Every structure is written in structure tokens, then in C-alpha cells.
Image (cartoon, coloured by chain):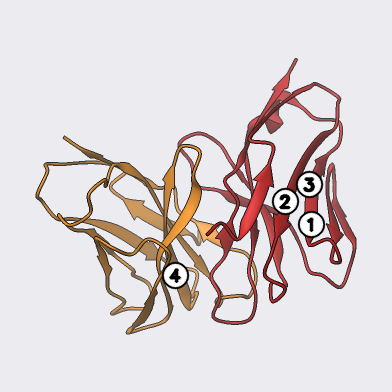
Chain colours: A red, B orange
Amino acid sequence: QQQVKQSPQSLIVQKGGISIINCAYENTAFDYFPWYQQFPGKGPALLIAIRPDVSEKKEGRFTISFNKSAKQFSLHIMDSQPGDSATYFCAASGDSGYALNFGKGTSLLVTP
Amino acid sequence: DGGITQSPKYLFRKEGQNVTLSCEQNLNHDAMYWYRQDPGQGLRLIYYSQIVNDFQKGDIAEGYSVSREKKESFPLTVTSAQKNPTAFYLCASSIATGLGGYTFGSGTRLTVV
């Protein structure tokens, strides 16, 4: 059972555009929502994370928006660059003892 | 530099053989994890360990086994009972489960020949 649903599966954005990736979860015990970036042949790297006490978190060009009532969160990449082309995973976990549950990933291609 | 080391990077296995994937971390993290990555499937949890000498099954534990005899090490054995072992395997660690982000290794690509 997929506990975190991610969309779209793939995304093509022009350089300078905004990339938006969405995730939804079911388990109301989840209280930690990170995003990971993965380049081919490498392990994922933590990009940005949010907890439900805030609705938005921004780090540079990356922003997480969080909607607790809708059980949804999204990643926005502003001014997308070709170097941002990678696979992005959302994830969620809850109380101590829970491992991260990952979405299926979004393959982002930023064209020059 | 602190981090997670997975070895080998590439591994080939004959059908019916067991193989062990190595994962070592020097981050002083208590929790360690094994995920399997297949195209279009995301990361699926195989096993995780919150503390030495303790581990729990994840969503797809069948055909796999682990041990956690040392804090730094969490090897994964892919047994002959795993029917479709060809995949990219990722090891990760964190300060504790449910607390903070994971640090991932660079992965081991296992191919059955």
C-alpha cells in the first residue's frame, strides 16, 4: 500500500520556469515531510524538509508548501536550471520508530 | 569526511546464490535502513534497525536478511529465496528513526546473471 502518492511521474520545464511536484499522504501520524534529489547512479540527497507546524518553508530556489487539512505537500523549484534535472522523491514519517515512506519519484528535465 | 560507504558498487550474482551487500557509516547514527529502488517504483523499505542487535522488517523483507552487530555496520544478504533480486540497493542512516533526514550511500547495483 502506497502511503505517499507523488505526481507527476515526469516533468519537462524550460530553463527559468517553475517546477511543481505534488505529494499526498493518508497517515495523520506523519509529522516529517522531506524532499530528496537523486542524480543517476547516485544515492538520494536531502533537499529540504518541513514539519506540519508551518505551511511553507523556503531554502534558496526551493520551497515546500504544506496543507495539513488536505494532507498534501508540494515542492516548487523557482528559476529552474538544467542542473536541476534529476529525480525528486517526497517522503513522510511519523513518531519515533517509523521509517520514511517514499513516493514513487518524479523525473524532472529542465531544457535549455 | 563522515558518510555512508556501500560496497561493491556493482555486483553480479548467479541464480541460486546468496550475496551480501556491505554498508558502513561513520556518522555515529543509531538508525540504519535498506531500500530497494526499481524504475518507476520509488524506494521500497526492506529492513531497518533502530539500534544495535535489533532490526525490523520493512515492506518487502521476503528473501532478504540483515544483521546489526555493530553500530557502524548494517549488511544486507540477498538470499536465493528472493525471486527478482536485480535492482539498485540503497543504504541510509539517520540519528534515529522518525528524527531528521537520512544520509544515503551511493548504492549497489545487483544484477542476476
Residue under the point 89% across and 58% down:
A56
Does label 4 lie on the same chain as label 3?
no
Residue receiving disc 4: B32
Query: Pointer 3 indicates a residue of which chain?
Result: A
Residue receiving disc 3: A75
Q: Is residue B39 above or below residue B29?
A: above
Determine the image quadrant of residue A48: bottom right
Q: Is residue B70 above or below residue B101?
A: below
**Dot placed on the residue nearer the N-terminal end, 1 or 2:** 2
Q: Which one is closest to the eye, mark 3 or mark 4?
A: 3
Horizontal side, residue A10 vs residue B88: left or right: right
Cβ atoms at labels 2 and 3 below 8 Å apart: yes
Q: Tag 1, which secondary structure?
A: strand
User: In the image, what residue type sits under mark 4?
Assistant: Met
What mark, if any, has residue A23 been given in the picture?
2
State the CA–CA distance, disc 4 to disc 1.
Answer: 27 Å
Cβ atoms at labels 1 and 3 below 8 Å apart: no
Horizontal side, residue A65 vs residue B6: left or right: right
Q: Tag 2, which secondary structure?
A: strand
Residue A11: x %, y % from top left: 70, 29
State the CA–CA distance, disc 1 to disc 2.
Answer: 6 Å
User: In the image, what residue type sits under mark 3?
Assistant: Leu
Q: Which one is closest to the eye, mark 2 or mark 3?
A: 2
Q: Tag 4, which secondary structure?
A: strand
Cβ atoms at labels 4 and 2 below 8 Å apart: no
